[in-house]
Amino acid sequence: MPRPKAYDATEVLERAMRAFWAHGYEGTSMSDLVDATGINRGSLYTAYADKHALFMESPRYFDQVYRADFLNSIAQHHAGKDAIVAAFEGVCALSEEGETPGGCLLVNTALELSPHDSEVRNFIDGCLSEVEGFFYEQLESAKHHHAMDRSTPSRQTAQAILALFLGLRVLTRTGPNKPTAAAIIAQVKAMLT
């Protein structure tokens, strides 16, 4: 009979995710993951076939806990244009708090691995599509409530806002950049008239 796990799988995944988030896939060794998670190499290989398998669980976990929950919370407290601006301001606030590694794990992963790892690329594309969908829904809501010009093309505007959002996430990778972040938020507000 196999021995029961002596660790919390979610906590192990959180710690592994933070190691990958801080150092990237290539910059994180199995020894680093053993140190970060506090469990031995054999247990890691029992739970995950290899480093790549553990890594792929990290952006999935990040996507649920940090991206989906973040946008869902914003959508519960804001609507339309206010929700879009709140998403940008929320990213700036997270960057200033400094409680997480720099930038966004999804964006960092896209920059590092998407060009040559189709599994990563497909996953990241799906996540970014969800973020674009959030912006699209908020634009449609603003138009429905007459808070925005109805002739504004929602899909193209959502794509442009996503590009600014990703740019902001790249900029926050090295820490807060208040003047540039303020300029990006001002540009988003200008797009929402």
Image (cartoon, rainbow, N blue to C red):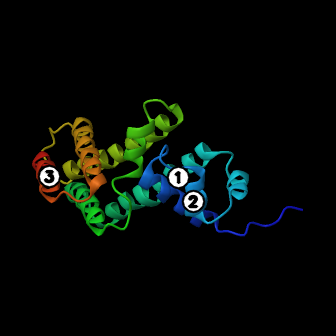
Which sits earlier in the primary sequence, circle 2 or circle 1? 2
Q: Name the residue beneath numbered marker 3.
A: 180
The residue that appears at 9% across and 48% down in the rendered structure is 190
Q: Name the residue beneath numbered marker 1.
A: 58
- Using the image as rendered, state which of residue 115 and residue 119 is in the foreground: 115
* Residue 64 locus on image (x, y percent): 48, 56
* Residue 46 locus on image (x, y percent): 73, 53
Figure quadrant of residue 87: bottom left
**CA separation in Å, label 3 and label 2:** 33 Å
Give the residue type at disc 3. Thr
* Residue 100 locus on image (x, y percent): 38, 63
**CA separation in Å, label 1 and label 3:** 29 Å
**Element marked by disc 3:** helix
**Element marked by disc 1:** helix
Whether residue 179 can be seen here: yes
Q: Name the residue beneath numbered marker 2.
A: 13
- Using the image as rendered, state which of residue 17 and residue 136 is in the foreground: 17
Q: Is residue 121 above or below residue 134?
A: above
**Element marked by disc 2:** helix
Give the residue type at disc 2. Leu
Are the residues tagged 3 and 2 within 8 Å (C-beta)? no
The residue that appears at 48% across and 35% down in the rendered structure is 122
Figure quadrant of residue 162: top left
Which sits earlier in the primary sequence, circle 3 or circle 2? 2
* Residue 77 locus on image (x, y percent): 30, 67
Classed neighbour count for the residue bearing mark 3: other residues with Cα under 10 Å, few (<14), some (14–19), many (≥20):
few
Give the residue type at disc 1. Ser
Classed neighbour count for the residue bearing mark 1: other residues with Cα under 10 Å, few (<14), some (14–19), many (≥20):
many
**CA separation in Å, label 2 and label 1:** 7 Å
